[in-house]
Amino acid sequence: MNAVETNVYRPVIGGYSCPCPINLSPVDWRQGMLIRSANWLGDAVMALPGVYRLRNLVPPGGRTTVLAPAKFADLWRSAPWIDQVITFAGRRLSAAERRQVRAAEPGVSVVLPNSFGAAWDLWRSGGGYIVGRAGRGRTWMFRGRLPEWRREAGHDKEHEARKYLELAAACGSRHWHTDYPALEPQLTDEARAAMDALVPANERLLAIAPGAAYGPAKQWPVGYFNEVARWWTAQHGRVIVCGAPGEEAVAMSAIADCRGAASIAGKSSVAQLMYVLAGVDCVLTNDSGVMHLAAGLGKDGVAIFGSTDPVATGPLGGRWVVMRHPLPCSPCLQRTCRRTDAPYECLKTITPQNVIDSIECLIS
């Protein structure tokens, strides 16, 4: 039986190795650059270093616009170096949303997601010189392209941030690192007051996030979260539990019998979540959007990994202890466990005491 791995996380970004540089020097930049955001919160956060490098390629007077799913608009509006955010509500752009893209007049558009539809939307919207990664039947839409980004379970050697940094480097960026200016969540006074009314003041705070939108193969048992929450309540302060709409029940289970604990699950926008995370002392999460968001804000924490690989999708920013139980079947990158002999063994073997010890090291 392999022991639980408990490591202070250090991302491996690697170096630029793309053989297909993209020449933007003859391009008519028109009003600037449009960047199609990733579709998952964690992926969007991991893209921030590359997007910042891309933004710095825009000529003086040009504008940097991000096209993003409406639910993640707050993330991009918190980046002070993004000039405009255009949102869309469905899987594909509506006619009205395509008109907004056309009105932005991008000379260059960069597609971050791997999907055909993300490229198709920009091609139909007059995205100018469209740049992205090849594959998935969409290569013909790109005037500047890099090879398809492929992953094979258990064979990742570098962080996914490299996928986005390579796009910037191919377009001419000479900076290869994951730094970017601090995020500044934009909240109204009313939105800020709503969080202040829920979150205890003048206490040491542990934020926990027991959910994971990807699926149960990324979710540490909620009872384990509860054991850690009760320990923190007894020894250090108060607990705040975070979660997306639909995760309210699991959030309440995670803070059962915890004095003064509060749930913002299903009650917070992304900007409000960022505001709350910025004020906590430590974070405990699965490999999830909350993990990436907290790390992007420079917070310290413990991250539990099950089916996914921290080499590729670990937290960028702050000090993080990444915990995983290596098994022959892990990482499998599956949403649900396919084993019948010991389902979710990779998650269940990581004990609450393992996590408590790691939190103690981070806050001491």
Image (spheres, grey):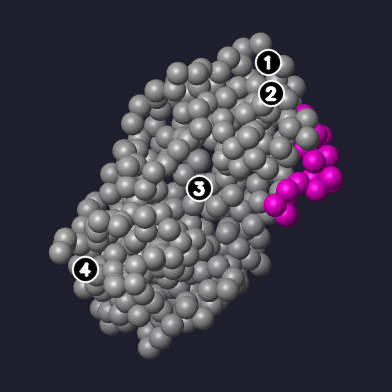
Q: Which residue is mark 2?
A: 129
Q: Secondary structure at mark 1?
A: loop
- Give how far apart the Cα atoms at labels 2 and 4 are: 50 Å
Which is nearer the N-term, disc 3 or disc 4?
A: 3
- Give the Cα distance between marks 2 and 1: 7 Å
Q: Is residue 245 left or right of residue 227?
A: right
Q: Residue at x 58, y 41 (%)?
A: 113
Taking the view exactly as shown, the residue that stands out farthest to the bottom is 257
- The reply to whether dot 2 and dot 4 touch (C-beta < 8 Å) is no
Secondary structure beneath dot 2 equals: strand
Pointers 2 and 1 in contact (C-beta within 8 Å): yes
Spot occupied by residue 319 in the image (x, y as percentages of width and height):
30, 51
Number of numbered callouts drawn: 4
Crowd tier of the residue under label 2, counting other residues whose Cα lies within 10 Å: few below 14, some 14–19, many 20 or above: many
Q: Secondary structure at mark 4?
A: helix
Q: Which residues are magenta?
A: 88-105
Q: Which residue bears the numbered disc 1? A: 27
**Label 2 vs 1, first from the N-terminus:** 1
Using the image, determine if residue 189 lies above or below residue 308. Answer: below
Q: How crowded is the residue under tag 3: few (<14 C-alpha within 10 Å), some, or many (20+)? A: some
- In whole angstroms, how far apart are the C-alphas of marks 2 and 3? 24 Å
- List the single residue furthest toward the front: 340
The mark that comes first in sequence, 1 or 4, is 1
Tag 1 near tag 4, CB within 8 Å: no
Mark 4, residue position:
354
Residue 320: in sight, yes or no? Answer: yes
Residue beneath disc 3: 43
Label 4 crowd bin: few (<14), some (14–19), many (20+), radius 10 Å? some
